[in-house]
């Protein structure tokens, strides 16, 4: 669960006069010095959204990809930058607490909590074919990571679910274990975004106007999530993927873009079938939310 604070909360008064932008940079710089994270050129990246006047919006992306935005109504770009840094700093420091690290004890408690909020039972934890089992397997794959790191990995699966890729894996009879194992090691990059954008271009061809509708919805969801202090990577990636697809949606761009992406697919897709018929390689969300995601995925788009 992300830390959320209202405009008049104690957290606002605590951070009011601090140099939160510098503190956030120093926090992640120290983690780099300690060797906790890989070296990156830009430790913390800010993105101010162009606007002729208030309210101003700023996003801050942390190493690994977690993203936060300003919570308050901001009257200047500098204020929006500070507020985004404040939200990111609060979540970054909270994420360092021992209770935010995935351990066997944490997994046991999380699975029990998930069982109590779904229709599953504790015996399902040993069966990856169930939503509880898939959730347990995801946690076990990521033992030792913090919940913020886990959310970064879960964002990949949320996008695959949203994009319809998990449904395709299910139809191809891929094993859920192999899909989880493979994508737990993948990072979102420009090629992955382009791949997903191509899928949406194909949907646009089948249903003209779909891209514009989905983009409007994504922008709305991103704004709502930002104003509630959530981690934003999933919402922001959706918006950017749809924007990329829409930018190539006219007839002049589509043919060349399609050819380029199909070439990439041929080089990088899964080798879907082996003798065992397995797939092999050729806004921090709390435990209940993550299990709900797996439950939704099981209802219609499981990779079982």
Image (cartoon, rainbow, N blue to C red):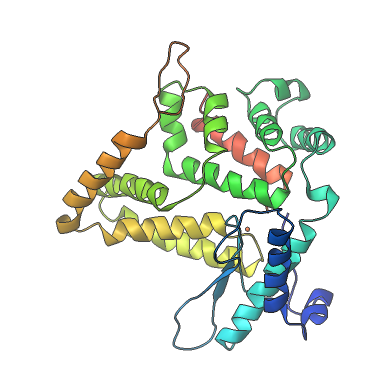
**Residue 43: where, in percent of width, then height?**
60, 65
Measuring from the top left, give residue 261's x and y in whole percent.
28, 45
Instruction: Please tell me whether residue 106 is drawn above or below residue 59 in the rendered image.
Output: above
- The answer to whether 128 appears left or right of 211 in the picture is right
> Do we see residue 74 in this rendering?
no
Is 118 drawn above or below residue 235 in the view shown? above
Q: Residue at x 54, y 67 (%)?
A: 223
Judged from this view, the residue extending furthest toward the top is 275
Q: Quadrant of the N terminus?
A: bottom right
Residue farthest to the left, as pictured? 252
What is the quadrant of residue 4 in the picture?
bottom right
Q: In terms of depth relative to the viewer, which is nearer, 213 or 167?
A: 167
- Is residue 253 something one can see in this rendering? yes
User: Residue 77 vs residue 23: left or right?
Assistant: left
Count of labels in the image: 0
Residue shown at the point (63%, 29%) measured from the top left: 134
User: Looking at the picture, how far across and down is residue 212, in whole percent?
Assistant: 33, 60
Give the left or right position of residue 207, taking residue 140 as reference: left
93, above or below 288, in the image: below
Classify residue 215 as left or right of residue 178: left
Q: Position of residue 103 (x, y in %)?
A: 80, 38
């Amino acid at each position: 669960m992300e830390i959320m604070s209202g405009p008049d909360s104690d957290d606002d008064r605590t951070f009011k006069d601090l140099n939160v932008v510098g503190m956030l940079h120093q926090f992640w710089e120290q983690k780099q010095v300690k060797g906790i994270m890989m070296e990156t050129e830009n430790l913390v990246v800010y993105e101010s959204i162009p606007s002729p006047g208030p309210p101003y919006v700023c996003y801050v992306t942390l190493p690994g990809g977690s993203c936060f935005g300003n919570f308050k109504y901001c009257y200047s770009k500098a204020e929006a930058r500070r507020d985004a840094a404040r939200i990111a700093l609060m979540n970054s420091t909270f994420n360092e607490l021992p209770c935010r690290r995935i351990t066997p004890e944490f997994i046991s408690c999380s699975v029990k909590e998930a069982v109590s909020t779904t229709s599953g039972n504790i015996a399902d934890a040993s069966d990856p074919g169930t939503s509880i089992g898939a959730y347990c397997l995801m946690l076990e794959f990521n033992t030792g990571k913090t919940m913020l790191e886990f959310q970064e990995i879960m964002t990949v699966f949320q996008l695959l679910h949203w994009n319809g890729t998990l449904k395709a894996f299910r139809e191809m009879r891929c094993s859920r274990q192999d899909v989880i194992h493979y994508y737990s090691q993948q990072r979102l990059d420009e090629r992955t975004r382009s791949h997903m954008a191509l899928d949406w271009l194909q949907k646009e061809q089948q249903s003209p106007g779909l891209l514009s509708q989905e983009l409007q919805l994504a922008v709305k969801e991103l704004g709502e999530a930002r104003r509630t202090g959530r981690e934003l990577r999933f919402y922001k990636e959706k918006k950017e993927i749809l924007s990329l697809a829409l930018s190539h949606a006219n007839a002049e761009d589509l043919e060349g873009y399609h050819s380029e992406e199909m070439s990439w697919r041929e080089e990088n897709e899964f080798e879907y079938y082996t003798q065992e018929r397995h797939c092999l390689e050729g806004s921090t969300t709390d435990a209940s939310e993550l299990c709900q995601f797996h439950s939704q995925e099981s209802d219609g788009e499981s990779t079982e």
